[in-house]
Amino acid sequence: MRVLYFGTYERDYPRNSQVISCLRGAGVEVVERHAQLWEGRRHRWSLGLAAMLRIAASETRLLFGRKGAFDVMIVGYPGHFDMPAARRIARGRPVVFNPLVSLWDTLVGDRARFSPGSPAAGVLRRIDRIAFRRADLVVADTEQHARYFAETFDLPRAKVEVCLVGAEDRVFRPGWQPPGQFDVLFVGKLIPLHGLETILEAARLLPDIPFRVIGSGQLEHQLRTRPGNVSWAPWVEYEELPAAIQEAGCALGVFGTSDKAARVIPNKAYQALACGTPLVTGDTPAARELLADEVDALLVPVGDAPALAAAIRRLASDGELAGRIGAAGRATYEARASEEVLGARWRALLEGLLAR
């Protein structure tokens, strides 16, 4: 099987690099046809004239790029603008959309970059609808997202499948040990989805426990008044993340209260599980698809800083519990989200599509 991974997708984003790695590990030949657009742009999402011209130029490069044979095309994330070009290039061969998110849901519903009634919101709705409906198969990251995509874009449920996100096995490996000094790690974009305000309030309730925040984004201003036990680094190199995760007393997932937050399992959660680091994350329908409270993670009500603080305190004061949660998290990762497992899942989805 030969797969063309296609579009303006962000090459270094884990959902893309990990899917390509999974497929190659499963014996699938993967070639790429990529036009740079999103890399290196901190505030990526804009619908102004300059942004539209950049998008148009990238789509033109895709249309006239190097040609080659393939059996099935996968449009990577974020590939919503790429679907019209993808259908032309595919020439009747199956097109799989790996969207990760809805643009409208992300930029209007979750991040509030555009108001729901604005012209920009209407444009995003239309781009979403065109992208999702032109795919032969949509691969979502959770059952919650699959249901949302099918209902929102009026897709047959059989046209939307699920493959978890996972982590890159070559990068995130088991290595957690009980730290000499327990600290808490949060890694990720500072956007409403992640519940930064809840994390900072939990830190205020635990002044004797250090918190480390790694990331930048929309809500950086909340860190200007962070408590004294919270340190902040806007960025670390990706290859340095495993050590940071392995050295933490526990890692945090997402605690936002938006509808989208209830539908996702973030990269950081899989990375913590892969490293065997105890994970604390929001108790959401998506989290329950993979995790069980008190078994392989501690799940707490979203937006509830006292509950989050209590869970962290438990892990800090009970080394046996922390070790058990971390080990069970790694076992769950190996059984449900390793590259071997996800590679087999992706290959099966593509083979099933080709057999139709």
Image (cartoon, helix red, strand yellow):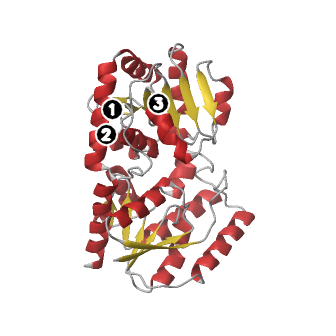
Residues at circles 2 and 1 in contact by the CB criterion of under 8 Å:
yes
Q: Which three-letter amino acid code belongs to the residue tagged 1?
A: Gly
Q: Is residue 256 visible?
A: no
To which residue does mark 2 refer? 330
Q: Residue at x 65, y 69 (%)?
A: 55
* Quadrant (top left, top right, bottom left, bottom right) of the N terminus: bottom left
Q: Residue furthest right?
A: 50
Q: Which three-letter amino acid code belongs to the residue tagged 2?
A: Arg
Q: Position of residue 304 (x, y in %)?
A: 44, 25
To which residue does mark 3 refer? 247
Mark toward the start of the polypeptide (3 vs 2): 3
Between 204 and 118, which is closer to the camera in this rendering? 204
Of helix, strand and loop, which one carries label 2? helix
Of helix, strand and loop, which one carries label 1? helix
Q: Which three-letter amino acid code belongs to the residue tagged 3?
A: Glu
Between 72 and 278, which is closer to the camera in this rendering? 278
- Residue 109 placement, left or right of 2: right
Q: Position of residue 24 (x, y in %)?
A: 38, 66
Q: CA distance from mark 3 to mark 1?
A: 12 Å
Between 238 and 41, which is closer to the camera in this rendering? 238
Q: Position of residue 180 (x, y in %)?
A: 45, 19
Choose top left, top right, bottom left or bottom right for residue 11: bottom right
Q: CA distance from mark 2 to mark 1?
A: 6 Å
